[in-house]
Amino acid sequence: MKKKYADLHCHPHSRAFHWMRHTKNEQRADKYHPWNIVLSNFKKQEKGKRAFSYSQCDPVKLWNGEAKLVFASLYPFEKGFYKGGEIDQSKLIRILDVLATSGLGLLNPLKWFQAIFAFATGAPTILKIARAFLQSLLMRMPIRRIKHFISSDYDYYEELVLERDFLLSKSGHDTRNEIYIPGIKRLFKSPSKLRKKYPESLDATGRYIVCKDHSEVKSTLDNDQIAMVLTIEGMHALGTDVSLDKVEDRIMEIKQWPVPVFFMTFAHHFNNFLGGHAHSFPDALRILSDQTDGMNGGMLPEGEKAIKLLLGLNENLNQDPSLGRRILVDLKHTSALSRQWYYEKVVAPCLGKEDTIPVILSHVGYSGWQTLDEAIAYAGQENDHELNDGFYPWNINACGEDVMWAAKTGGLVGICFDQRILGDKKDKVKSIDLIWKNLKAMVDAILENGELNNEQKSKCWSYFTLGTDFEGYIDPTQDYGNSLLFDDFEKDLYEKVHTLKEIDGAKYHLADDNDVEKAVRGICFDNAYHFLERNF
């Protein structure tokens, strides 16, 4: 029997959506769908480089990689990516310094794009087209899309609904994929030859179903099809940049969608005017985009109301059927200060009322901090150069206190496959060692926490799953750069857990090889499946 894999956070449809939006294909149902696979740069894919120019988890890769339980995240691109901060003398000096001190800086197009962007930032309207062109080159995003993102016509909520409909367009349909070849390449590349040359990436006939509840997830998996569960990344998707007046109405509208949203990631990279987002951009990207407004801040009154409404809670934190079905809250990208509010003011009081709200951290690494207070205190010092005992110490990552709340509530933590988030920027650490270091540290945080009981600690492996962030333009761990490589990951993870059993099996609740297999299978699939069984 083939092993199945789960991914708590990825965007399997997004590359096709962005490449075919605003084209003639948008008017053709036979072409405008997620199974129309955008041709990848296979050299970059094979090397596991940053995923600007290749797909990591489109439906073909999911199907052929046996990734059969997929939490598909809808994400309207944020306008902040295309509104850089104002250039000042200190930034200019930094840019020139980077170019001068980097060994091949003068020959590296990325360095020049960063420098040119800094000058274009905050410039008059006449430079918008030039800026869009440069973003297109850097992100391998069609320039027509970026022009739309910076236009006055771009509306987050409208885009969210269009993206949802794009994903739903092939739900429940057996489909053989097509191959979308962008631009001039289609004149000299043959789809049939590409299928034969890259069958794992470009040839599959399959079916995915965007599921309504756990029973549909089960039947879909029993039929060996891809079960997708809908999620949304970022409350900005409700149009909070324009007005907060429609937030409550749109939450209630989403609760009436024909296919339910299982969880919503509260924050993302920029101010959503509801609560603080965690610092996420390294220095190089900060030159292009300014995310400081609202960064690392606390929860705002409007955000408090929105979270209660998502969870179906009234002002007294009691469940209210009139507020519709519960949409869980994912805390990835939420600032440590706002997470602290959520635990203290929502999760803990509800737990006292026997209403357990599972904590979700959909795609994180470990920060090395034990408490949120430590993460909050360090937030103003976050930089590209310091690690905390080998961990990436920014408050975008989970600390021991976050993991404790996940365990206490039967929640779920997705292990991100972005090497920077895991504490490595230049492929210096072997992929499995990098992931294992973060995973084991979080397991240790559970076992060493005085607030958790023995039963909760005995389930220490059950709170984790894969949360790759594939198709999120990440720089992946080299050995597991796309969903075709999940089987390799599982074999490597088994070796790590098995070695741990030999060294200290009693402490880690690994009595024998069956326990090792259960822990590894849980992380790769079972934990996510059982989480849905309890909550969907």
Image: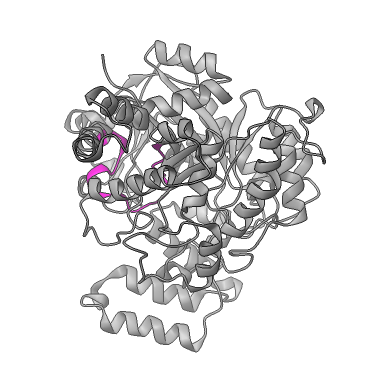
In the depicted view, which residue is nearer to us: 168 or 336?
A: 336
Q: Main secondary structure of the magenta part?
A: loop
Rendering quarter of residue 295? bottom right
Q: Is residue 273 above or below residue 503?
A: below
Rendering quarter of residue 93? bottom left
Residue 190 locus on image (x, y percent): 23, 34
Residue at x-position 40% and y-position 10%: 223
In the depicted view, which residue is nearer to us: 265 or 194?
A: 265
Residue at x-position 52% and y-position 35%: 411
In the depicted view, which residue is nearer to us: 109 or 226?
A: 226
Residue 271 is covered by the magenta coloring:
no
Residue 438 visible in the shown view: yes
Position of the N terminus by quadrant: top left
Residue 269 locus on image (x, y percent): 54, 57
Q: How many marks?
A: 0
Q: Is residue 76 above or below residue 88?
A: above
Rendering quarter of residue 149? bottom right
Residue at x-position 55% and y-position 64%: 376
Residue 479 is covered by the magenta coloring:
yes
In the depicted view, which residue is nearer to us: 286 or 121?
A: 286
Q: Which residues are magenta?
A: 465-485
Residue 211 locus on image (x, y percent): 53, 21
Position of the C terminus by quadrant: top right
Residue 502 locus on image (x, y percent): 18, 36
Residue 277 visible in the shown view: no
